[in-house]
Image (cartoon, rainbow, N blue to C red):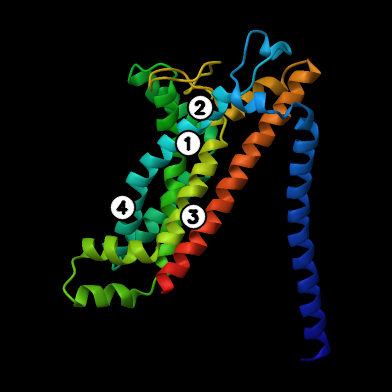
């Protein structure tokens, strides 16, 4: 290696290292600020109680309604996304394997849907809600979030399936399996670790989104007991509390942000753990 290439190599390594550690530092800084500002208000009452009278003016209570509302919406939306997304990704990689132009067109459209701002999904969900005669409710929020995260799940799982050798499909078909059997018994099993990651990433995106549920899920201090009742979410709880002129309420907003951050971090760690575990299982 001559001196010029050696200098270029070292420069690229240095720049890559700076970029990597900068991202880690920014993430750490965000998490530290959130926890420092919300530490004094972070308590069991925040997690286990719903808002009481005057909560948004410094009264007692917590954000249990928002925690459960976020989980209900994200879980319901993720279930819908799985029912649509898993077969769609398998269809793209099995039944359209010989139709590259169609594959690329579908992937381009999914990428476009992935890039649409969540407020646009919220506006569409609100329009759909009015068309169907629905009120702002848990169900409306679930449908809107499902529309938001389905392209994410499909494209993530699609990328995993596209890395599986084509020879595996050909061997399965040569042994007499149908394309449907190949999709669900061979490809799905091989791509299971990536599918788990895709599901949990979609769940994390759904639970942390505010704009798409702003007009569709509504907001309430109660825990929703039915699909047609409004539901609070943690992002909206943070938004409403952060806009308060009362310092104590703003601290609670950071505490709610810390709770949401913990949920998303746990979801990400769970995705990595399950993915690694099922990867080892498939190798055996």
Kindly report the distance in space between the C-alpha atoms of the residues bearing marks 1 and 2: 8 Å
User: Label 1 neighbourhood size at 10 Å, few (<14), some (14-19), many (20+)?
Assistant: many
Q: Is residue 175 left or right of residue 55?
A: left
Q: Nearer the viewer, mark 4 or mark 3?
A: 3
Disc on the earlier residue, 1 or 2? 2
Kindly report the distance in space between the C-alpha atoms of the residues bearing marks 3 and 1: 15 Å
User: Label 3 neighbourhood size at 10 Å, few (<14), some (14-19), many (20+)?
Assistant: many
**Camera sees residue 248:** yes
Kindly report the distance in space between the C-alpha atoms of the residues bearing marks 4 and 3: 16 Å
Disc on the earlier residue, 4 or 1? 1
* Residue 100 image point, x, y percent: 34, 65
Q: Which residue is mark 3?
A: 197
**Camera sees residue 146:** no
**Circles 4 and 3 in contact, beta carbons < 8 Å:** no
Q: Which residue is mark 4?
A: 87
* Residue 25 image point, x, y percent: 78, 53
The label shown at residue 69 is 2
Kindly report the distance in space between the C-alpha atoms of the residues bearing marks 4 and 1: 20 Å
From this viewpoint, which residue is outermost toward the bottom?
1
Which type of secondary structure does the marked residue at label 4 adopt? helix
Q: Is residue 26 left or right of residue 274?
A: right
Which residue is located at x 80 percent, y 91 percent? 2
Disc on the earlier residue, 3 or 1? 1
Q: Nearer the viewer, residue 273 or 170?
A: 273
Disc on the earlier residue, 4 or 3? 4
Q: Nearer the viewer, residue 31 or 136?
A: 31
* Residue 46 image point, x, y percent: 66, 25
User: Label 2 neighbourhood size at 10 Å, few (<14), some (14-19), many (20+)?
Assistant: many
**Circles 3 and 1 in contact, beta carbons < 8 Å:** no
Which type of secondary structure does the marked residue at label 2 adopt? helix
């Amino acid at each position: 290696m001559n001196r010029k290439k050696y200098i270029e190599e070292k420069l690229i390594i240095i720049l890559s290292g700076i970029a990597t550690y900068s991202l880690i530092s920014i993430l750490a800084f965000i998490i530290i600020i959130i926890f420092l500002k919300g530490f004094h208000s972070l308590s069991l009452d925040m997690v286990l109680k719903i808002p009481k009278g005057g909560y948004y003016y410094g009264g007692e209570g917590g954000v249990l309604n928002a925690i459960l509302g976020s989980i209900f919406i994200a879980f319901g939306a993720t279930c819908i996304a799985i029912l649509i997304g898993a077969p769609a990704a398998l269809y793209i990689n099995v039944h359209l394997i010989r139709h590259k132009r169609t594959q690329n067109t579908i992937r381009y459209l999914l990428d476009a849907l992935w890039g649409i701002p969540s407020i646009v999904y919220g506006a569409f969900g609100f329009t759909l809600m009015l068309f169907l005669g629905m009120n702002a409710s848990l169900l409306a929020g679930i449908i809107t979030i499902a529309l938001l995260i389905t392209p994410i799940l499909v494209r993530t799982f699609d990328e995993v399936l596209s890395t599986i050798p084509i020879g595996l499909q050909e061997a399965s078909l040569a042994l007499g399996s149908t394309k449907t059997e190949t999709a669900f018994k061979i490809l799905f099993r091989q791509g299971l670790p990536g599918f788990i990651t895709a599901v949990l990433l979609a769940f994390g995106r759904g639970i942390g989104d505010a704009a798409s549920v702003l007009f569709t899920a509504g907001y309430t201090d109660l825990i929703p007991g039915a699909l047609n009742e409004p539901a609070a979410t943690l992002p909206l709880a943070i938004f409403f509390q952060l806009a308060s002129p009362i310092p104590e309420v703003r601290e609670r907003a950071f505490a709610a942000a810390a709770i949401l951050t913990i949920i998303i971090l746990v979801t990400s760690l769970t995705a990595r753990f399950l993915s690694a575990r099922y990867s080892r299982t498939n190798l055996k």
